[in-house]
Amino acid sequence: MSRARQDGLTCAGAQRWGAGSSRQVPSTPPTSPLLLSRATSSWFREVGGGRGLEWRPGLEWAEEGRGRIEAAVCSQRHFWTLLTPATGDFRHCYLRMEEDTDFRTRFSSLCFFTDHVGFHGTIKNSPSDFLVTEIDEQGNLVYKATEPICKFSELSPEPNNFAKKSKLNLQNLSAEEKNNQKINSLTEHSAVDQNHRSGSEKEDAINDATTKREDENVDVLGSLLDEKMNELLIQFACDVKEKWESKTELLMPSPEFSLGRILDKNQRALLHSAIRQKFPFLITVGKNSEILVKPNLEYKELCHLVSEEEAFDFFKYLDAKKENSKFTFKPDTNKDHRKAVHHFVNKRFGNLVETKAFPELNHKGGNPNVAITVRFREKAHKQRKRSLHECQERKVIYTAFTLRKENLEMFEAVGILAVKLGVIPSDFSYAGLKDKKAITYQAMVVRKVTPERLKNIVKEIEKKRMNVFNIRSVKDSLKLGQLKGNHFDIVIRNLKNHRNDSANLRERILESIEHVKNKGFVNYYGPQRFGLGRKVHTDQIGLALLKSEMVKAVKLFLTPEDLDDPVNRAKKYFLQTEDVKGTLALMPEFKVRERALLESLHRFSMTEEGCIQAWFSFPHSMRIFYVHAYSSKIWNEAASYRLATYGSRVVTGDLVCLDESIDDEHFSNSKVHLVTEEEESANTYVIHQVVLPVLGYNIQYPQNKVGQWYQETLGRDGLQTCRFKIPALKMNVPGCYRQILKHPHNLAYQLMEEHAIDVKIEGSPMSKTTLSLLISFDLDASCYATVCLREIMKHDF
């Protein structure tokens, strides 16, 4: 058995030509397609003299209309594939060049990982055959709960669901009841004066009042902390009070409790306030996004001067900072005692509040009852009022919603929404891009638009094949990659065996699905990452931007396809004349991106500086998209080279990810390890742990042939000295790491028969039955369903 097949790669060519053989090819690349006679075929296999080309048996195996790809010839820029007829007769072989100008042939050069035969079928016959639903960071599907979109919900997915459904109210209620029991217990501790100066009736009254105050904050903390953390916080509060009452805290250092790191600053602010309001005898301290909870020693000190009920209320008053509010301690006849209270408040909080004493009205004889009133200082109060007003003026409105779009490109959808709402495309944020020819559901956030205003355009955008729902106010925008993954519901129609495969079709389908479910698929970036254009791909634009060739990037963006429609006629006119104003007049209104770029060019001219300004008409996420497309193309080529060179073995110099819990691309260099010779010998790692770098300034390369390949490729593209920073466009590309292999999660499927009327040549109608496959699965963020299906079906779409 060949080494390549031992490594798990599909190598039909290796069987035919001999494992690991190195063949040379003609020095001049043949035209495509080139028909070879038996003699020419023999000469092709045997004659040397190739320049920079290398024979790689087994790089590809796929069913084609005229035969099967048996092997591939690779150069630095192109792929040639040698196809044999279905009969296996070599008298009519032909060589096909995989041209960069055609994304279909370009992606047929990617390799497969599993060795099953696969089957044929069609996807995306209509947008409703391809449903994509985003999975948020909490593992929840973002579509509206009342809108069923799964086409075969009766299928039970695998255990340990990747996409978690929302919790039942019953579960939430039971958790609240459990917390309330602990809170009530804690309240009893809080309500009792530690010196027992109150009688039993007063103790009951304080208990009831405090319970009511505590209950006001139960829901706030419950919404910010999970059930376990909430219970631990309550237990910590109970422990603090118990130690105070037993005086054991004198013998040990002051305790503290960590709520962990809270990255969202708005959530941190809410937690600080909610904890101090609920437990005034505790304080919170922020440290590097971590919230620490500690005993409030000032609260304890005040409890020596006034009742705990008063201390409780006083600290709540301070924290609430309500405008024009006052706090009054209970009347007191003891002047020395009142003096001590004055001294405490002014010493601890004198920069914030001031105290005054007022005698009790209608007092008769003896020492008068005098009440101490606390209010915020006038100067500080005015400053605070202005600050609040200024904050409200500066506060940016963020409105979150779920976008449903059908057969609509992502950037086109954003452009339409921007026009309807009177904002610019960069005011929208999202976690990831979604397919065009599909029905997609994704979370979005728009700045400077209120929920009411967004609701007003719902009817208008329905005509544009869009819907918005789950509209609500939020504190911040979304960031790219801020999702757990995507859920797919896909229909594959017109199922049939590959040519010359006589096996049972149902068995073939089951075998294919199980193979990929268990072994995974090569984690290529899908064709949609590079656009559907045949003349220009998004990665070419990205390369021009990385080389700071701004004018070239603009011209590539406006390069027409070989189609006679208004859009391509406008682009053709621009390249011929560079008449920006005339091109604007020709460009259809619905081409939002093209018009935005042209309007900027009309303003700033077609100079290098003018083109830089024109790129700023696109939001940052769109500018960086083109650079990422180039990085993605290089990663795809690197993955093919890595698998063709080393197969599924983990070798010295490979990079592996040490953290098995990571399911996205964004992890630090500290999580990446360089495989040693000893680890290779001991088979310490498996292929599923191997990662390859996605280009950027903060990544390391493999230290083997793959690392050399990266350097040669960057040299080929003129990026030897590229730092992956484009100051002119305010873009920095740190890079990341991507696993070579991925697995689908929660995979479920169902075969169904469809009946159609087929008309025979004689004219007599006959019913024809075809099979369709309904398949559902979840993929991690930045994985492509079309790539997963390609591995399952062994078929390029």
Image (spheres, grey):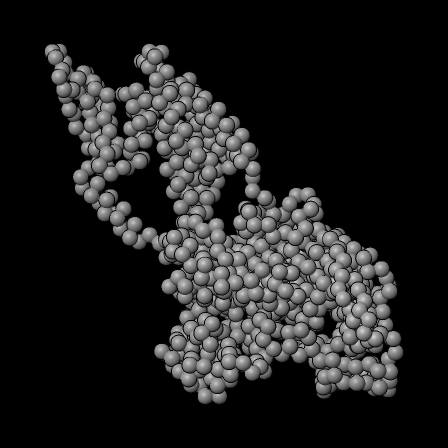
Instruction: From the viewer's perspective, tell me whether residue 708 is left or right of residue 417.
Output: right
Write the residue at 57% across / 47% down.
139
Looking at the picture, tell me which residue is in the foreground, 21 or 58.
58
Write the residue at 44% across / 34% down.
219
Looking at the picture, tell me which residue is in the foreground, 118 or 309.
118
User: Is there any visible trace of residue 668 in the rendered image?
Assistant: no
> From what the image shows, is residue 518 above or below residue 696?
above
Instruction: From the viewer's perspective, tell me whether residue 364 is left or right of residue 143.
Output: left
Q: Position of residue 737 (x, y in %)?
A: 59, 59
> From what the image shows, is residue 607 above or below residue 294?
below
Report the number of discs. Answer: 0
Looking at the picture, tell me which residue is in the foreground, 221 or 448.
448
User: Is there any visible trace of residue 561 in the rendered image?
Assistant: yes
Q: Quadrant of residue 456?
A: bottom left
Q: Quadrant of the N terminus?
A: bottom right
Q: Quadrant of the C terminus?
A: bottom right
Looking at the picture, tell me which residue is in the foreground, 728 or 63.
63
Write the residue at 58% across / 81% down.
563
Q: Position of residue 225 (x, y in %)?
A: 48, 37
Write the residue at 35% across / 22% down.
209
Q: Quadrant of residue 642?
A: bottom right
Q: Quadrant of residue 704?
A: bottom right
Instruction: From the viewer's perspective, tell me whether residue 222 is left or right of residue 755.
Output: left
Q: Position of residue 608 (x, y in %)?
A: 42, 80
> From what the image shows, is residue 270 above or below residue 450?
above
Q: Position of residue 138 (x, y in %)?
A: 54, 46
Which residue sits furthest left?
A: 365
Instruction: From the viewer's perspective, tell me whether residue 546 is left or right of residue 359.
Output: right
